[in-house]
Image (spheres, helix red, strand yellow):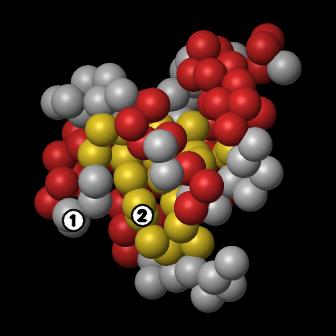
Amino acid sequence: MNTDHFKIAVIGAGHAGMELLTRLLNAEFVDLVGVTDTNPEAPGIALAQKHQVPVYTEMADLLVGAHEIDILIDVTGVKEVRDALRKHMQESGNYHTVIMHERISALLLSLFNGEMVETKASDEFY
């Protein structure tokens, strides 16, 4: 495991993911290895492409190399995405990759901004 860089992938490239993507792209200790969104026109997709980061419209395509990813950041707020991620990690035997829930990314962005960042996620699923 490389301890001087984090290999990170982001699931969800809409407006909620844009600031996070910008910060990840500017962090020297982060290797952004992929971004996925079902909407190929999502603003984060264009940003990732501009920085030569691989983009996907199917989460399954991103997960092909998931054993190499340190942290998968889910910013979708969609229960089905969370469930699919957990299922994939269990079925693939991937005990390396950590799934970071949208509420944690919202916390980080809120701390960066000094105020609460709104998300569409609901805690009712936990």
124, 32: nearer the viewer:
32
Q: Residue at x 28, y 46 (%)?
A: 55
Residue in the image at 77% along x and 33% along y: 90
Q: Nearer the viewer, residue 59 or 18?
A: 59
Quarter of the image where one finds residue 4? bottom right
Secondary element at tag 1: loop
The answer to whether 75 is drawn above or below residue 108 in the figure is above
Q: Residues within 10 Å of mark 2 (few under 14, many from 20)?
A: many
Q: Earlier in the sequence, mark 2 or mark 1?
A: 2
How packed mark 1 is, by other alpha carbons closer than 10 Å (few <14, some 14-19, many 20 or more), is few
Q: Is residue 89 above or below residue 73?
A: above
Quadrant hosting residue 26: bottom left
Residue under pointer 2: 32
Q: CA distance from mark 2 to mark 1?
A: 10 Å
Examine the rendering and report whether any part of residue 10 can be seen: yes
Q: Position of residue 49 (x, y in %)?
A: 18, 54
